[in-house]
Image (tube, rainbow, N blue to C red):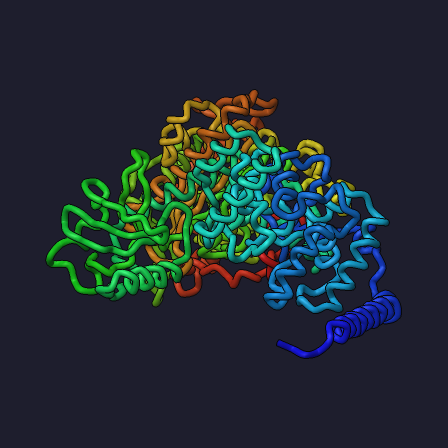
Amino acid sequence: MSNRPSWLNRRNVIRASLIAGGTALAGSIALVCYAAFVIRPSLPTLEAVTDYHPKIPLRIYTADKVLIGEFGEEHRDFTPIAEVPELMKKSVLAIEDSRFYEHGGIDWIRALGAARANLRGSFRQGGSTITMQVARDFYLSKDKFISRKMAEVMLAYRIEAALGKDKILELYMNNIYLGQRSYGFASAAQAYFGKSLKELSIAEMAMLAGLPQNPSRNNPAVNPKKARQRQQVVLRRMHELGYITEAQYDKAKKEQLHVNHRGQEFDTHAEYVAELARQAVFAEFKEESYTRGINVYTTILSKDQDAAYASVRSNVVAYDQRHGYRGPEAYIELPADEEERDDAIDEALGKRVVSDGLIPAVVLQASPTLVKAETSDGDVLSISGEGLKLATSALSEKAKQGFAIRPGAVIRVMQTEKKNWAITQVPKVAAAFVSLDANTGAYQAMVGGFDFGLQKFNHVTQAWRQPGSSIKPFIYSAAVAKGFGPATVIADEPLEMPGGANGEPWKPQNDDGKFDGQVTMRRSLAASKNVPSVRLLRAAGLDDTHAYLARFGFDLARHPKNYTMALGTGAVTPLQMAGAYAVFANGGYKVTPYLISRVVDAKGAAIMDIKPPQPANAGERVLEERNLFIMDSMMRDVARSGTGAAAGRLGRPDLAGKTGTTSDSMDGWFAGYGGGIVAVAWMGYDEPKSLGGREFGATLSLPIWMDYMRVALPKHPPVERPVPEGVVQLNGDWILEEYSNDPTVRAVDLDDIPAEGEQQAPADGAQPAPQAPPAPNTPATPGQPAIQQFPPPQPPAGA
């Protein structure tokens, strides 16, 4: 025992207490002085929160307000607090700051508890209120230093003094980072669930409310187990606080959530449209385009766009499957260890670009009757029966090593209409489709390629390709203007003209290699006869016909001034072709295709001067009504009994158009119209090569056109064309009245050979080779229908 007097021990305790108290007092005074003279003067103004301007991305919409594109580094969607569902707010408050509406910015009860924990664990537990988080997110770093914490506390008090509670909560719920490049709960709802806040279930709200603590660890798209654990904590807390009933709690706990694992997606596929609109806005506003909340409304109709996208995809896949399986995309080794095998599969599939509906998978087991393959989701699919049809040769025991489907092969699978799985592949062939309102030039739908994710090149606006026979209506229209008519008889007999290769004669041929003797001009167009078309061009005049093309918007520099012009050896884009056929569809008027109808800022105020063109009949007439009537009647025959006769299955009397197939079937076209809609479909390889000896515009592109029109036409009544004054009957068909008594236009002589020295074929006698698409940044040339003068593409800030 100690011999020291008790009074001495008491004195030491008192002395120690005084020293500790003095030290604490001195420390407190020092902290107050530090806060007052060092931190306080350096605090920022509150302008960032009192005059909040969130960085809202550029958004692109269809005419019927369906979101089709978003560009910006941050996904944001500012939502006023009054529009946030009550349970969404309560789910956040339950887990982040349940006493938010009671404290003055600092919850001292919670803070003292956190302080005790931090003294034992080096500042690992926080007691931050929502107000403090707003202060930190807008002004400070997230490092846990005392000086930063003091600044956070002081800012919290200033924010509470300057703003009401609802406003503070509004800032928090719109600015907090929640993973997947999403800022704010409205954007996160779209990113994770594809829903608005009002559409969320309690379980989904709780999942989102669990994200602020650690958006990476609790991200349901990449860490579903951790996310669900956190969600259960939120739900339990909501129940404890009485925010939800026992029944709601039980239901939410058990609800199976469907999380979008691929980031933000859009219901309508219009990626090529969105990119064109982005280019137009970027040209005007540069980098500011991606932060000031600009909304662009296009002329695209979502249901029409859906039909166009589905049509291009299905018909390209159908063509690709007609031409056989090319083999697996790659092969990998499958380790024996299960964990190593899973890692190898994940790595292999992670390198594959996802194409809508064409899912990459790694083969685990293969035989001629059954294939088992694992997808990136970890699902093992069994494929048998019809699902193996495409890959039958690759499953044969005789299949070559680099072609065979065997364990470790990386393949593509798709789900059929019957919900069975089938082996497929990503097509190599390209395609394009565009439709316009023929009377205004407004885009209705546009698909620039098979998959924007695989190829950004927009074939509608950038691919210059030979039009083949789809150019013939314009050649024939020039002949009608010279007095020839549908009843004009043309010799469909072998033709030799000077100017062939190596001094040999040039001998144009019909596609089928057959000659029918004497044919009418109407029959020649319907059957797409080449030799009669060359004779008709000669009779109408080469120079005049070449110049005539300009009135339809064609770039004359891209069309040869020789007789191969009748065979479509020039170059056009699908958009240019649509603008040209619009003249036939709208009564003879030139239109300028346009895409954007309105550009507004975040508050809805117009910020670009957009003046959509006037209706066609208020513009420039480029084709006489009588000529139009005769040409329309001939092109209706193409769609009834000619090369486009399959269009008759649509049951519309006003459909008209023309197929096009270039030399060696390198391009397939169908351009046509009905009900005031003009549409063009094209298919071909980017590096031009034959599409197959049995493939034509009628087998390649007409099905795309028909599948689209089947959806688009019912909204539009058939167009009737009364016989205009000045058109009369001759030999049972139409002709311009002033030529009805002129015998020279009733037939194109079999021996109508051009005068000596007149050029009729290319200098080397060969038809020009199809032109490969230019680089994606190739600007439009004069004569191409403009899309409101879009600039060359600029790199997007996010997607």
Residue 293 image point, x, y percent: 71, 48
Q: Residue furthest left?
A: 397
* Res 636 visible: yes
Q: Report whether 72 appears left or right of 524.
A: right
Q: Nearer the viewer, residue 780 or 303?
A: 303
Q: Residue furthest bottom?
A: 3
Q: Nearer the viewer, residue 181 or 696?
A: 181
* Res 577 visible: no
Q: Quadrant of residue 337?
A: bottom left
The correct choice, above or below, for 384 with respect to 722 in the image is below
Q: Nearer the viewer, residue 767 or 707?
A: 707
Residue 418 image point, x, y percent: 29, 33
Q: Report whether 377 appears left or right of 66.
A: left
The correct choice, above or below, for 308 with respect to 11 in the image is above
Residue at image position (66%, 67%) is 143
Q: Nearer the viewer, residue 8 or 305?
A: 8
Number of on-image labels: 0
Quarter holding the N terminus?
bottom right
Residue 799 image point, x, y percent: 57, 54
Residue at image position (70%, 39%) is 613
Residue 366 image point, x, y percent: 18, 53
Q: Quadrant of residue 241?
A: top right
Residue at image position (47%, 29%) is 711
Residue at image position (76%, 71%) is 10
Q: Report whether 618 appears left or right of 208.
A: right
